[in-house]
Amino acid sequence: MACGALYLCERTTAIELHAVARRLMCNLERQNETQESDGRFELWMLQTYLLMSHFSAYVGTFAMHQRASSLFPQTIKLAQDAFERLSSCQTLSYKDWVYQETIIRCIAHTVELGAALASTTKEQCFTAPFYDTPFPLPSCNSIWQQTEHEWQGFLQQPDSGKMQDCILAGQKPASPISDLGLVALVSLILWRTCSFEALAGSYRLDLSTDFVNRTDRAVRVLDTIFKERAEQNEASQTLPNPLLSIARALLNSVFYHLYASETLTEMKRLLDFPRKRKVSDARARMVGLDYSSRLSIALFRAAEALQYDCQMGVHYLQRMAPHQFGPIISTACYEGGLLLSWYLRNRSTLFPDPDTTAKLDQVIYELSAELATLRDTSNDDCLLNFPLVVAAELLSDRSVWQFPSAVSEKLKVLTQHPNNAPLQSMFSA
């Protein structure tokens, strides 16, 4: 009910309903602690905690997003308990299949939310229940929406563990994967990457050749599957597919964390503390790193994402995305903007090959015409802040989710701060 109120733009009612839900669940937990419990898994509890975790993560300030970790571990525990309820029976009734498919979809959405949180905050490192324990991937929406009369019987879905082994080996799975299944696989790889990054340090991720190469194979396979799926969707539909839009955003985050880990970490620190840190400080910490092919992969991906958003229409996406795609896509949006902003400030010292900077410059320069429609949102008309201005505008809508707009305000502060004064004649060289 709280999430439903959000989509009706009744934020006060939504927050009150969420608070009531939290109190009810806390009372239930206290009762279970004082009374003997049979330990039986309850699907409604997993669904409730998943919704409350989603609500806590994206309704409120940036600090509230960080505090979503207080709810999410319980969601993970319930999702882990749900594994035991999955049946390996090949002859399920329609009712049993709906129950099992609901559990699978809850697990998939838990992985999706976990990956998004792991990409944002270092405290979310709970990959073990999902990466090491396989689960069936969700069915496609056309099957999920079938009535009992239309349903033609149970079909075993691909196993997440086998699919991961396949893509990590650089092989495209032979079994068909649903859109939500694709989101779950991308989320597992993103969560795995961010967990390694948090546990070992971003500088170690940059240096860990084995980890990067192994994950690189999986990323390329997933990117191929996604592009094929996106082309099919564009040919058959006029509107963007929400699940594919989420898959695109999560896949972009994988690129950024895998190939530009330390750069992204420094820019996020600058975003959090713009008045305490300077771009020159961040640059000094990264002297001597190899800014060659790996970093260029992340930067080109960010440029492609910026190009896609501008071609779709910044104001159109700003109004539509909160209602159609949800807030999870916001993370990749501002991560890409931060990386491109960093590139524009350091472009002259990054790549020995002038073709690399020329290609990136061309994409950004061609898109800069979009900046003319955004000048009322920033005092800086220079191309230097163009990626940040676009990201800030995309995330500025507060009608549904508040976390993206909180990030938007931080991006605007970053564009206006004296430490980030424009560089002159950026494209004169």
Image (tube, grey):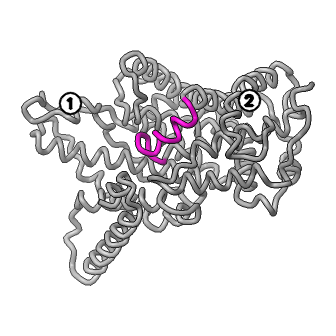
Disc 2 is placed on an element classified as: helix
Q: Is residue 201 above or below residue 12?
A: above
Amino acid at circle 1: Leu
Q: Quadrant of the N terminus?
A: bottom left
Amino acid at circle 2: Ser
- The answer to which quarter of the image holds residue 15 is bottom left
Residue 180 magenta-drawn?
A: no
Where residue 339 sits in the image (x, y, percent)? 72, 40
- The answer to which quarter of the image holds residue 274 is bottom right
Question: Residue 153 or 71: which is nearer the viewer?
Answer: 71
Question: Magenta segment, which residues?
Answer: 313-327
**Label 1: how many Cα within 10 Å (few below 14, some 14–19, many 20+):** few
Disc 1 marks which residue?
155
**Label 2: how many Cα within 10 Å (few below 14, some 14–19, many 20+):** some
Q: Residue 287's mark?
A: none
Choose mark 1 or mark 2, whichever is in front.
Answer: 2
Whether residue 257 is visible here, answered yes or no, is no
Q: Residue at x 79, y 35 (%)?
A: 383
Where residue 157 sits in the image (x, y, percent)? 28, 32
Whether residue 387 is visible here, answered yes or no, is yes
Relative placement, left or right, of 290 versus 27 is right
Relative placement, left or right, of 278 versus 58 is right
Residue 315 magenta-drawn?
A: yes
> What is the magenta segment's predominant secondary structure?
helix
Q: Are marks 1 and 2 in contact (CB under 8 Å)?
A: no
Q: Quadrant of the C terminus?
A: top right
Relative placement, left or right, of 130 versus 97 is right
Q: Residue at x 44, y 37 (%)?
A: 185
Q: Is residue 87 above or below residue 306?
A: below
Q: Residue 296's mark?
A: 2
Where residue 223 sits in the image (x, y, percent)? 53, 26
Work out whether mark 1 precedes mark 2 in sequence or the reverse, and give the earlier one.
Answer: 1
